[in-house]
Amino acid sequence: MYNQHKILRVLQLISLLKATPAKSIRHLSEVLNSTERTIYRYVDLLEELGFQISRTGVNHLYIDRTDASGEMSFSAEESNLLRQLLLTTGKKSKLRDSILRKLAVHSEEHLHADHLLKAHLSKIIEQLSTAIQAGKQVTLKKYHSVNSNIISDRLVEPICFTDNYQSLAAYEIKTGKNKYFNIERISAIAITNRSFAHTVKHKFAKPDVFGFSLADEQYKVDVLMSMRVSVLLKEEYPMTASLIRREGKTDRYHFKATVNDLKPVSRFVLGFPEEITVLGSAAFKRYLEECVGRLIKNRG
């Protein structure tokens, strides 16, 4: 039984490392309920087995989405285009069905499906789906908040899942707010006997590129950064990738977005003061100045 448990942990680790973004050893140990030392041993084992474990500048780990043959998988957009072409111009081809099956395997959609196959996450998703259909409040056990860096239980009314089951949109009873909860940071689910009591307050809006739900106020962010920082931004917040553009033929990269909360982008920008130029907005500049002011005051 112990060996089976160990194998399951290693398989879960592989799935976690394949899913973006890259993850710290601490986060992996919390999700897998193991010690950091054990995670290091598992990583060494994977490398011995031939897995290419890559590391970001902040020592977060990930497995590159290149398969053993060195061929890159199709993106979801590429797969959809190929599938549409096959279903139209390739209708009479005897190879059509074979190619369609392979597309389902060698694509990012299959990699996202792996997310659902992880034992602990699939169970959580199944329980949440049951609660949503039954209209029951649930407790998210030992949820790890990246914002507050606090692990606590959260009583919520689940609304729906975001794309690829990455997050749960839910109404949190204590704060009276609609929030997004990362599925990977939920340790367990407890479905209560209490039915929804705040349905009229349920709201769902697609989160911004930093994963924050729609707030009372939105903010414009406009910055220039070095290539190194642009890569780190995409690794830490993959949804920002589509909004990062190279500035002409220079080595500077432009990031412009509308966000629901300034905290995550401010923390990132303040980490690279020599490689980022803040162009706007005025509200974002004021917020950064306030953050720096608090840092100086705290040091005094």
Image: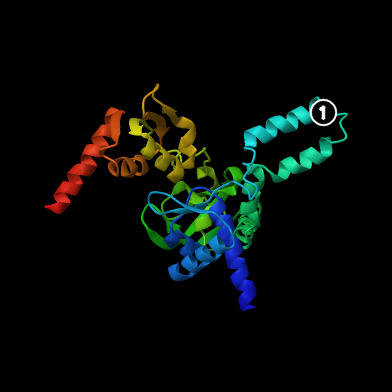
Quadrant of the image for the N terminus? bottom right
Q: Is residue 193 visible?
A: no
Q: Quadrant of residue 193?
A: bottom right
Residue reaching furthest to the top: 248
Q: Amino acid at mark 1?
A: Gly
Foreground pick, 27 / 71? 71
Foreground pick, 78 / 124? 78
Secondary structure under tag 1 reads loop
Residue 34 appears at what percent x and percent y? 49, 69
Dot 1 crowding, Cα within 10 Å, few <14, some 14–19, many 20+: some
**Depicted 209 relative to depicted 166: above or below:** above
Q: Quadrant of residue 137?
A: bottom right
**Depicted 189 relative to depicted 272: above or below:** below
Residue 69 appears at what percent x and percent y? 65, 47
Left or right: residue 147 versus residue 108 is: left
Foreground pick, 275 / 157? 275
Q: Quadrant of residue 118?
A: bottom right
Left or right: residue 84 versus residue 45 is: right
**Depicted 241 relative to depicted 124: above or below:** above
Numbered circles on residues, count: 1
Residue 226 appears at what percent x and percent y? 34, 34
**Depicted 298 relative to depicted 108: above or below:** below
Left or right: residue 113 versus residue 269 is: right
Foreground pick, 194 / 1? 1
Residue at point 39%, 31% (across, down): 255
Please give the residue where the numbered disc 1 appears in the rendered image. 90
Residue 252 appears at what percent x and percent y? 35, 29
Q: Is residue 22 visible?
A: yes
Residue at point 60%, 45% (across, down): 164
Residue at point 47%, 47% (across, down): 179
